Amino acid sequence: MDFITLFFLFSAFFSASAQQIQSNVSRGSSLTPTANSTWLSHSGLYAFGFYKQGNGYAVGIFIAGIPEKTVVWTANRDGLPVPKNTTLLFASDGRLVLQMGQEQLAVVADSSGSASASMLNSGNFVIYNSKKVIIWQSFDYPTDTFLPSQRLLAGHEMFSSISETDHSTGIFRLKMQNDGNLVQYPVDTPDTAPYAYYASGTNGLGDNVTLNFAADGYLYLLNATGFNIKNLTAGGHPTEETIYLMRLDVDGIFRLYSQNLKQKGNWSIEWSSSLDKCDPKGLCGLNSFCASFDQEPDCLCIPGFEKVHPGNRTAGCERSFPEEGCNNKNGDIKYSFEEVSNTIWEDVSYSVLSVPSKESCEQACLEDCNCEAALFKDRTCSKQRLPLRYGRRTQTNPNIAFIKVSISTPTTPNGNMPKENKKEFREDILIICASFVAFGCMMLVVSGFVFYKNHFRYRKLSYDGNVELSHEFAPRSFTYSELEQVTGGFTEEVGRGSFGAVFKGAMSIGEKVVAVKRLEKVLAEGEREFQTEMKVIGRTHHKNLVRLLGYCHDGIHRLLVYEYMSNGSLADVLFTPEKQPCWDERMGIARNVAKGILYLHEECDEQIIHCDIKPHNILMDEFGCAKISDFGLAKLLKQDQTKTFTGIRGTRGYVAPEWHRKLPITVKADVYSYGIVLLEIICCRKNVDWNLPEKEAILEEWAYHCFETGDITKLLGDEEVDKKQVERMVRLAIWCIQDEPSLRPSMKKVLLMLEGTVDIPIPPSPASFLSAI
Ligand SMILES: *[C@@H]1O[C@H](CO)[C@@H](O)[C@H](O)[C@H]1NC(C)=O
Ligand SMILES: *[C@@H]1O[C@H](CO)[C@@H](O)[C@H](O)[C@H]1NC(C)=O
Ligand SMILES: *[C@@H]1O[C@H](CO)[C@@H](O)[C@H](O)[C@H]1NC(C)=O
Ligand SMILES: *[C@@H]1O[C@H](CO)[C@@H](O)[C@H](O)[C@H]1NC(C)=O
Ligand SMILES: *[C@@H]1O[C@H](CO)[C@@H](O)[C@H](O)[C@H]1NC(C)=O
Ligand SMILES: *[C@@H]1O[C@H](CO)[C@@H](O)[C@H](O)[C@H]1NC(C)=O
Ligand SMILES: *[C@@H]1O[C@H](CO)[C@@H](O)[C@H](O)[C@H]1NC(C)=O
Ligand SMILES: *[C@@H]1O[C@H](CO)[C@@H](O)[C@H](O)[C@H]1NC(C)=O
């Protein structure tokens, strides 16, 4: 591209502005949101620096030389906007940091030892060492936008933004896979075909395939030897006065845009990865499906459901009326079916039948208490549990989905009213709701009786060894031989926990990889307790909890089937020197774990005290997101198991002191364990390590000693971290490990403190309360 021309073109735009072209930046330079807010590229087209975001500012790169300033890169995109009095400093140690006064808010580029930086005409912000070698560049950390001359390397991905104005990580991703395929998925899904909604189809054409972008709008894939294996766009567009960019848009589609600089126009779309805006999976939330009207996608609820948050389509839909029991064995049918035709869904069927007609599919689902919906196509009937995901209407596919609805549930066609009727419909709902409140009260009385009756029937069935599961039960039940097949005869042991060995396995359907845990020390009898616990665990859904997919209760065998976590446990990550994450990643893990525990304590249907929070029970998924496992299992342990937590020479490991004092166990016991884990996360070491000098061996004591003597940096070794941040975290950990449970903060408070929303007062010595008595 002819940047000289551009420069002349744009000098006009900036003659009135306070910004200066200063493409070569030396150490010690700084920017503020109000004066000298950016460093411009030589052409004047691209700017690096502050731009307005929400009620503050963000740091990034934007195209300054056009009327509609377009952000193409954001530093710390998920961080909060910063206030007016922030400074972006190219510090004397070579790093690029955000500061407020003397306090460091964030590291924009961890480029210690660098000498200079430059906003290049390509839109790449680069940082050089003293030999003019690039040691950091924004092109290596793409956000949602891809610029000419940028490359997306194998194993790397881009993420969409939340909205046009908020550039935080959104819900779609585009990944250049190691197998050579360029694929789009929703976030937080495995890289497997069932989740993909776009693929370049170049898998198997070699390792190290890259996505490349030429200045004339040409997007193409090269294999490792530089051979062109696929053209996404035609290229060959004019380059004079026209600029291009590719963006993974908020709606999940990636598009090539162009803009003619002379005409001062807007961006126009040159190419789209898809023309159907319903293609991106996850655009509509759970229990809703995407349908396009005049090219614009809309999310409709399945029958008997209504939107959780009207106006937020990703929030999905929930049952508009209470569920009823499933007693069809008695012959009293409480359900009917609503049909949703021409839709496709994620197939997570727990049972697939071959049936002659759609009526027999309906009947099969009706007779099965576990069945909440059925998908019928070509004489196959797939029984499913809710929620239904990734739904969309298609013209080409004669699929029919049946949704089981209560006979008393008033439904509307497709679960949604046309927009004009919405107001009237709301009033209807009010009246219906009022009558339902009255009805609900009556049901409460009636259900008392029903429960009493069921209670007895349950017992009887248990005697026959023929336990019926309740219908809201989400995880699927397996027989022992099925799990034997899934794990290939329990051959690949991937771990061993306090409850028994864990094996890797693969489901035949969709080849989903799972972890199968064989419980060893659980109560021999107590089938009902087992079922009840499974039900409680199965109802928990949170991104920081490992998902229970199924269980087996077959003869003497008790097994649990979980989603497989590819990156091992937090213990592996923290205590293996090569794997240790940096400070910011570790704080992310600490927040993830806190969110998971908070959910168990306060947000799920039935409060769950984990009782065994430790790094071995915290697993890492492929994206480095921490998830808690083994929750809800404490109640299954034999009585004596809970007493086997023994301390080593005065330490308690992760176990709160009240365990030893035979005091009642509350959620605060988990807070204690979290405090110990937090110290381990801060220091990257085990809580007890006798290889260290004696006074350092017990982490909780050593940490308090360092805190008391104001020598907190000793805890981190060589790692360079802002001392204030470390001190905040150590203070929080000490609050969590107070001997007296009531002094420990709740998990909600812990999370607020972690996020910096709440001040952390100076904690007392963990044992002070008791010694004072
Ligand atoms: C910036 O540095 C480059 C490479 O050292 C040099 O060629 C160029 O003249 C410098 N530009 C300015 C404006 O100093
Ligand atoms: C902006 O930076 C230039 C040099 O880069 C300096 O001369 C000028 O004083 C700065 N302006 C403010 C308001 O800091
Ligand atoms: C910066 O502004 C924030 C509020 O916007 C204030 O709380 C903070 O104390 C200020 N910091 C400095 C160093 O002036
Ligand atoms: C790249 O593609 C060419 C042509 O298909 C092939 O000859 C070459 O081996 C490929 N390189 C790699 C590394 O796969
Ligand atoms: C792909 O890149 C990795 C890392 O750069 C390298 O180890 C590997 O040999 C490359 N593979 C091919 C086929 O070039
Ligand atoms: C892609 O387009 C270029 C010309 O623009 C052509 O030379 C090349 O063969 C094409 N590659 C494929 C895989 O079609
Ligand atoms: C650019 O877009 C804005 C808002 O979408 C519109 O008001 C304006 O007319 C457009 N300008 C041109 C030149 O198309
Ligand atoms: C919409 O709902 C999703 C899922 O519940 C939530 O993550 C997101 O923050 C919501 N968006 C808005 C704008 O409220």
Image (cartoon, rainbow, N blue to C red):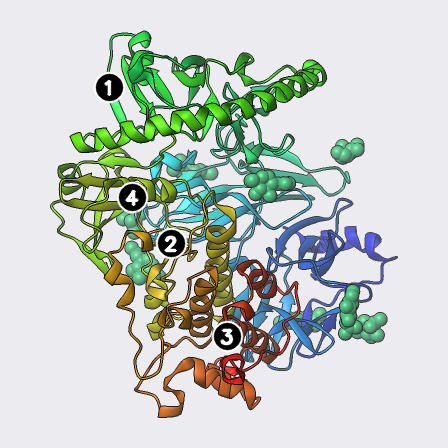
The foreground one among 240 and 755 is 755
Q: CA distance from mark 3 to mark 4?
A: 33 Å
**Which label lies toward us, 4 or 2?**
4
Q: Earlier in the sequence, mark 3 or mark 4?
A: 4
Per the image, the residue denoted by label 2 is 621
Q: Quadrant of residue 520?
A: bottom left
Question: Which element is circle 4 on?
Answer: helix
The answer to whether mark 4 and mark 1 are in CB contact below 8 A is no
Q: Quadrant of residue 753?
A: bottom right
Residue type highlighted by circle 3? Gln
Per the image, the residue denoted by label 1 is 353
Q: Earlier in the sequence, mark 2 or mark 1?
A: 1
Q: Earlier in the sequence, mark 3 or mark 2?
A: 2
Residue type highlighted by circle 1? Leu
Residue shown at the point (30%, 87%) measured from the top left:
691
Residue shown at the point (36%, 22%) measured from the top left:
326
Above or below — where is 369 with respect to 705? above
The answer to whether mark 3 and mark 4 are in CB contact below 8 A is no
Residue type highlighted by circle 4? Glu
Give the residue at the far right of this rendering: 16
Answer with left or right where residue 465 lies relative to residue 311.
left
Answer with left or right where residue 572 lies relative to residue 773.
left
Residue shown at the point (64%, 67%) measured from the top left:
118
Per the image, the residue denoted by label 4 is 529
Q: Residues within 10 Å of mark 1 (few under 14, many from 20)?
A: some
**Which label lies toward us, 3 or 4?**
4
